[in-house]
Amino acid sequence: MIKYIVLGLSLLTAVACTGNGKKKERQTVNTAKVAEPLVDTSLLVLDTLMIDSFLVNKPAFKEFKEDFRTFYAARNFRYAWFDTKGIIEGAQHLAGQIRARENDGVIKKQAYADEFFTLIDQQKAKPLKPLLALELMLTAQYFSYSKNRLGGSELTKAKDLGWYLQAKKLSYAQLLAKQLKSPSSEIEQEAVIPQYIALRKMLNHYQELEKKEKDVWVDNDTLFKKISVGDTLVALAKLRERLLQLGDLKIKAPDSVYDQPLADAIVRFKKRHGIRADFSISQGFLKEINVPLHSRIQQMMINLERMRWIPLGDHGAKFILVNIPAYQLYYYENNKLSWGCKVVVGKAMNQTVIFEGNLQYIVFSPYWYVPESIIKKEILPAMKNNPAYLDRHRMEWNDGKVRQKPGADNSLGLVKFIFPNVNDIYLHDTPSKPLFKEDVRAFSHGCIRVEKPKELAALLLPKWTSKNIDAAMKGGKEQWIPLKSKVPVYIGYFTAYVDSAGELNFRDDVYQRDGRLLEMLMQ
């Protein structure tokens, strides 16, 4: 229904005297005028040539050519950002979002933003008739900002950063159509994973914190090494203040006392940062607690970008996620975290690849076929120094390859989990159990060592008893078991995330990838 602007409504009453002194009857005259619409929407039509001309002059938006055509064709090429009253409220809302893009965790600047803001501000100050340039600029800015905010501004460069997870696909034309039809709806919840929403909420909290407060610096007091619960130390005041600032300490107490609430806050902070959770005030703890708020804000924004790359949809009734910087494996059932354990990932020289696959086989008592790179770099030089090297390590030549026989000392342990891929990466057991006690667990040649392989096998083979699994693992004969249903496996890289308990976590950038992504986003 066309809305009209009513200019005014008045009732005029005239009272006059006749020649004989009698009053005339009171007369009411309705002079209400219904104004013509400010904008005649029937004239607000464009065509593909206008769109093409706009994109020629604004080449940064050329990637959205199909979105432009799809969006306007669906509405018979009528304007989207103007109605009978002029420019719609959503235009100002979009401009406000782009001006405050950091609130959405967006680092990358919008193309032609200054020109866009000028057009918007002019229209706000002095409403004019609809401008074709502003109409198309609004649509282009929506597409571009939706990509930066929801789709990932650097998705096309993800592989340059070693990210080989399947790319997410979004229709920005459909997003805009939905947004205009229902401005108050949460369109973004349909376009990103839930973890993105949770991390952005934490980002906004840190942004507000940075505006209101300065970083509290905790000095490295030498007496921290000896302190225990019940002791007093003046230097604890700043530590207590910092933990209160970050939310790990919930209540105020005497500044210089190392009481139980303070000890519990230290443990909570350590858990959130992947540090061994004890009551000690260690060097690693002090390093993490003194990371500035601004650096944490940047870290969250970098990881929000990565989360924008994650494809949507049903990941299956069961799936496995490995987060490399957290050195953790997570097992999900019906999109809920069901189980998890520690993992060991590739060291910096042999980085675990970020990709996805489908787990299809469990191999009990596996042979380990030594990769060519390890044969050349490690085994052949060792054989020159010790001709009995292969026998000593229970290895043998097989079809021109070196393999290690099944057994407890096998480098793959007693079981491996196969999800076929060109990178030849898989999950497996290991005889090197002490490595799981380390905070930083980047020791492998690229494959992923699992702390609790028997438990994982039991989850994947629900009809197998514990005795069956034990017998297969210790049988000494390689046995391949195909799974009835493939289980998706996702290998990811997130140095900031919100866990299933709602706690904000940070991890060290073990492969030094955050800085490279930040540089790309700031270009």
Image (cartoon, rainbow, N blue to C red):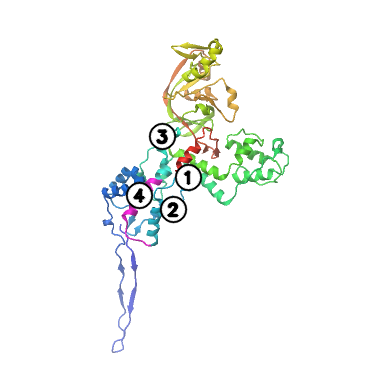
**Looking at the rendering, in which quadrant would you find the N terminus?**
bottom left
- x, y (%) of residue 17? 31, 86
The residue wearing badge 1 is 105
The residue wearing badge 4 is 139
Q: CA distance from mark 1 to mark 2?
A: 14 Å
- Please state which amino acid type lies under the numbered disc 1: Gly
Asked if disc 1 and disc 2 are in contact, CB closer than 8 Å, the reply is no
**Looking at the rendering, in which quadrant would you find the C terminus?**
top left
Specify whether residue 213 is painted magenta: no
Instruction: Answer with mark 1 or mark 3, whichever residue precedes in sequence.
Output: 1
- Please state which amino acid type lies under the numbered disc 2: Gly
Q: CA distance from mark 1 to mark 4?
A: 21 Å
- Please state which amino acid type lies under the numbered disc 3: Asp
Instruction: Answer with mark 2 or mark 3, whichever residue precedes in sequence.
Output: 2
The residue wearing badge 2 is 96
Magenta residues span 126-145
Instruction: Answer with mark 1 or mark 4, whichever residue precedes in sequence.
Output: 1
Q: Is residue 277 visible?
A: yes
Q: CA distance from mark 2 to mark 4?
A: 15 Å
Task: Tell me if residue 91 comes above or below residue 27 in the rendering.
Answer: above
Instruction: Answer few, some or many: residues within 10 Å of disc 3's Cα (few below 14, many 20 plus, some between 14 and 19).
Output: few
- Relative placement, left or right, of 281 versus 309 is right
- x, y (%) of residue 281? 66, 37
Asked if disc 2 and disc 4 are in contact, CB closer than 8 Å, the reply is no
